[in-house]
Image: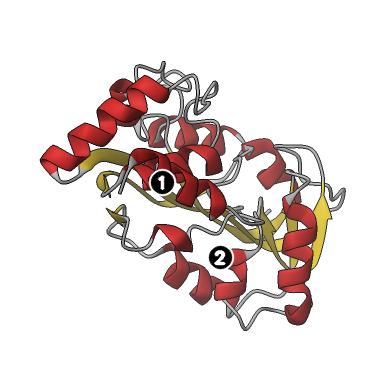
Amino acid sequence: MLIEQAIASSVGAEGPGWDFSWLRGRTSGGRPPWSYSRRASKLLAVARRPLDVDTGGGEVLASLAPLPRHMVATEAWRPNIPVAAERLRPYGVVVLGGAANRIPIRDVVFDLVLNRHGGLNAAEVARVLVPNGRLLTQQVGSRNGLALNNALGAPPPADPDGWTLAIAVERLKSHGLDVLDAREEMIDYVFHDIAAVVFQLRAVPWQIRDFDLARYDGALRRLHDRIRVEGAFVTRDHRFLIEARQPRH
């Protein structure tokens, strides 16, 4: 496939929310050794009033159904709010918009906070969790996908040491939470064609903040040729998982 056709196919595949199903067969790997979904489902089974932070288009939360009756989700990116509301309406989930890294609830009401790849504000989590309430979060670390930035001659999106398991754990502990489990992995993530690279960078614009097809045309063509010769391009996903608890007062 010519690079122009490949890029056109990836741009045409973009839809509402954060649905990455188009990448199936075009990428592989990226699975951590733990299962966030399995652990979240177990916690949801005993939760009475849970919260899902930065739910995106509601894709992951919907996959965990059945959900508790008094489930609330928040989303800070405005285009995702109606997508999440529509997807989660059949499950009775209330979707609230709000500012990034802020939970738009004043009261201490939640016995479970879920957060998959959302902003993790330790102070906000500690504020809304009831005594003995749980937090389960899977985070994207600051060393995520840096080989892709290097291959395209782009700067890293942030300080590579700026968001790691150690930093997140320290912040949660500093706000009084007990950390029950903490794991961190660097996981191979494989792109099998240039269309997948373009789709990923357009869907996750913070990876290369000035990404533009025209600006990176030459770099994309060089990476396209490299993938054709080598069969794939491998970068690494930086993931960490934390389960924490609000102590009994």
Q: Is residue 239 visible?
A: no
Q: Quadrant of residue 100?
A: top right
* Residue pointed to by mark 2: 60
Q: Nearer the viewer, residue 72 or 27?
A: 27
The CA distance from mark 2 to mark 1 is 31 Å
* Residue pointed to by mark 1: 5
Query: What's the amino acid at mark 2?
Result: Val
- Image coords of residue 1 (percent x, y): 30, 49
Q: Residue furthest left?
A: 230
For the point 60% across and 78% down, the residue is 46
How packed mark 1 is, by other alpha carbons closer than 10 Å (few <14, some 14-19, many 20 or more), is: few
For the point 70% across and 37% down, the residue is 101
Query: What's the amino acid at mark 1?
Result: Gln
- Image coords of residue 79 (percent x, y): 75, 48
Residue 103 vertical placement versus 209 (above, below): below
Using residue 110 as the reference point, say whether residue 36 is left or right of it. left
